[in-house]
Image (cartoon, rainbow, N blue to C red):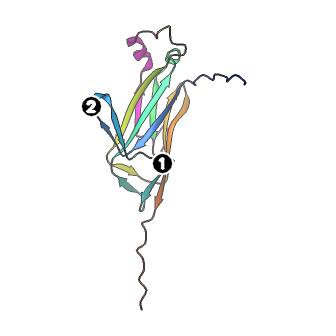
Amino acid sequence: MSEIEHVPRPSPHGHCIFCEDIRQEINAKESYVGVFAGPDMHVLGKLPTNVGKFFIKVYYSQRPTDAAAPVRLVVMMPGETAETAATQAEIDFPALMRDFPPPSPELDDPFLSIQMVFGFNPLEIKQEGIIDVRAIRDGKSYRLGALRVKSRPPAEPPTEVAN
């Protein structure tokens, strides 16, 4: 049997959960309601339209040694770019690193991680395309998650056949 090669986690990395609601439970638990399990969000009817509640839970991690620059989390709606996106958050990792003790020497590959929730109520969908979540650091863009928006016309009512 051959030995399995250990591949270290990339830095930075992250992921997103796209859902209709995030509820805070007791004992520091969260419930995710209406999670989009696939790559698509199907919007019934014509665009533009408003969708009820919509949440994105963003998980972002990087090595403490990479924390010399701030990170900008950007949520781009279909048709937006990183420069025009209305939803952004800046994380000052250098300041965070000053407030935290150094990682334990027992950790062979420590990471500094954050979680952030972006909530929309309602979410305005102007056109089909990709809801794209990115982390931008030092002029580089890292995709954390994406959800494709597709518009579907409402189902036609069945036509009655005259006898």
Most foreground residue, 59 or 92: 59
Q: Mark 1 = which residue?
A: 78
Question: Which residue is situated farthest in the left direction here?
Answer: 26
Residue annotated with mark 2: 26
Mark 2 vs mark 1, CA separation in Å: 35 Å
Q: In the rendered view, would you say 64 is above or below 51? A: above
* Image vertical order of residue 12 relative to residue 102, above or below: below
Residue sitting at x 41%, y 89%: 162
Who is closer to the viewer here, 5 or 121?
5
Image spot of residue 8 (x, y percent): 60, 22
Q: Choose the circle earlier in sequence order: 2 or 1.
A: 2
Magenta-colored span: 76-103
Q: Is residue 82 above or below residue 138?
A: below
Give the crowd class for mark 2: few <14, some 14-19, many >=20 residues within 10 Å.
Answer: few
Snapshot quadrant of residue 156: bottom left
CB atoms at circles 2 and 1 under 8 Å apart?
no
Q: Residue at x 41, y 34 (%)?
A: 88
Q: Nearer the viewer, residue 42 or 28?
A: 28
Q: Is residue 83 inside the magenta stretch?
A: yes
The C terminus - image quarter? bottom left
- The one nearer the camera, 126 or 38, is 38
